[in-house]
Image (cartoon, grey):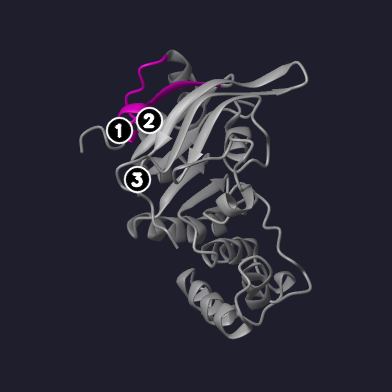
Amino acid sequence: MTTLDTRTNAIEITGLRKLFGTNEVLRGIDFHVGPGEVVCVIGPSGSGKSTLLRCVNLLEEPSAGTIRVAGADVTDSEVDIDAVRRRIGMVFQSFNLFPHLTALGNVMIAQRKVLKRDKAEAEKIARENLERVGLADKVGSYPAQLSGGQQQRVAIARALAMGPQVMLFDEPTSALDPELVGDVLGVMRGLAEAGMTMLVVTHEMSFAREVADRVVFMDGGVVVEEGPPQQVIADPAHERTRAFLSRVLDPAAARIGEGE
């Protein structure tokens, strides 16, 4: 598979707008994600974060603007969107696992149907990625036999098994009980350390602060502020960012990292 050109951005978004009827959810978004970079998008509910993510792989069709992923213009009417989507792994809030398939089967199925890998190769890659997310001992378990955190880790393994160049995460821990969040974030930290390009919509401020190269704060369908986490989270420049953080962080937590 072709690797990302390190001279170009992995994701380049220019002038992105999205309307649902007369409701303009995205109002001219411009930002990028570099190869190997982790960018966390934060902001209040309804700010357009998830819509932005869904536009990147055309689960939602942009109303205006351009999006380039791994050098391909996904908004070009002539683009082979299926080929582009094979470069993009996406993990949703809900796990979307097939209940009648084991963890192994869930990680194999897209490899077999989309990438046309033979059974032996698909199984080998599935086992490797289940081990990567800490579930080597759960290959024969069905989703109903797994915790929410384990199901989400199967979903991550399924995305990784396709060999993506970019990973998109849409609030991957929001449906989990608090005690299950850590294992999923731990897997994501490992991916970041391994150099995976990641665009993450999250409410987990500690993860954004510790793992992100850059944080993008969105509100009202626009990018209000972006920069390193020690700037955006610890010392935000805009009142809208400060007001949001005051609601999701206690004062002591908001100051973590200021002296580092």
132 up-or-down from 174: above or below: below
Q: Which residue is mark 3?
A: 210
Q: Is residue 67 visible?
A: yes
Q: Amino acid at mark 3?
A: Glu
The answer to whether mark 2 and mark 1 are in CB contact below 8 A is yes
Q: Position of residue 97 (x, y in %)?
A: 71, 63
Q: Position of residue 86 (x, y in %)?
A: 57, 56
Name the disc covering residue 233, or none: 2
Q: Position of residue 19 (x, y in %)?
A: 70, 22
Q: Which residue is mark 1?
A: 230
Q: Amino acid at mark 1?
A: Gln
**Residue at screen point 37% across, 31% down:** 254
How far apart are labels 1 and 3 at the CA level? 9 Å
Q: Which part of the image, by quadrant, shows the C terminus? A: top left
What residue span does the magenta drawing correspond to?
222-238
Q: As drawn, which residue projects farthest toward the left? A: 260
